[in-house]
Amino acid sequence: MKIYTRGGDDGTTALLYGGRVSKDDAGPHAYGTTDEAVSALGVARAEAEAGSEILELLIRLQRDLFVVGAELATAPENRSKLTDGTTRVTLEMVTQLEPIIDAITERFEQPSEFVLPGENRISALLDVARTVVRRAERDCVGATRLGWLEAESQVVPYLNRLADLCWTLARWQEGVFRPARREIVD
């Protein structure tokens, strides 16, 4: 099997369960950004120690984002074919992130000021992943407004919670919170 199909040379892309749309339609735009989030988490994962708690969590989150991508890659008329937790994001997927955020938050002192990313490599990469997830969230809000996603979809809440988790993981990986200095460096 060849990696190229030439099917997208006309500026369209195939959807899960059939159909083709323009590559710049709301769905492909949103799942493209979601794919970027998967990759951003992968770069952070590459910095994690083998067998570590964060490594396993990042793998889980990357897999969850494949579910997000599947829902986004399905035309509205084919959404009845989606399977909860496999190709459709569920409320349970959203709520399962909350106790993780709470448990990780207990491991560090909450910052009282804006955080300046870059304390160490993995925390900086998690902050980059957070910003990509936030962009995916914004793209999905737009996709919902345009009717690509149904209002009851759990994609936007999931991405919202995931961005919060990425922020929390970044602070945890910093080890010790250090507020941003207000000095100007020449």
Image (cartoon, rainbow, N blue to C red):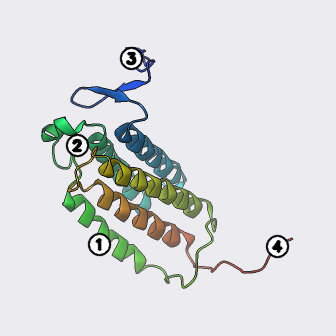
First in sequence: mark 4 vs mark 1: 1
Proximity of marks 2 and 4: CB atoms separated by less than 8 Å:
no
* Residue at image point 62% right, 79% down: 178
Q: Which residue is mark 2?
A: 87
Which three-letter amino acid code belongs to the residue tagged 1?
Pro
Q: Residue furthest right?
A: 186
Task: Name the element at disc 4.
Answer: loop
Q: Is residue 37 above or below residue 23?
A: below
First in sequence: mark 2 vs mark 4: 2
Q: Residue 135 at what x, y percent from top left?
A: 47, 54
The Cα–Cα distance between marks 3 and 2, rounded to whole angstroms, is 23 Å
Specify the label residue 99 is tagged with: 1
Which three-letter amino acid code belongs to the residue tagged 3?
Gly
Q: Residue 90 at what x, y percent from top left?
A: 20, 55
First in sequence: mark 3 vs mark 4: 3
Residue situated in front as seen by the camera: 138 or 180: 138
Q: Which residue is mark 3?
A: 7
First in sequence: mark 3 vs mark 2: 3
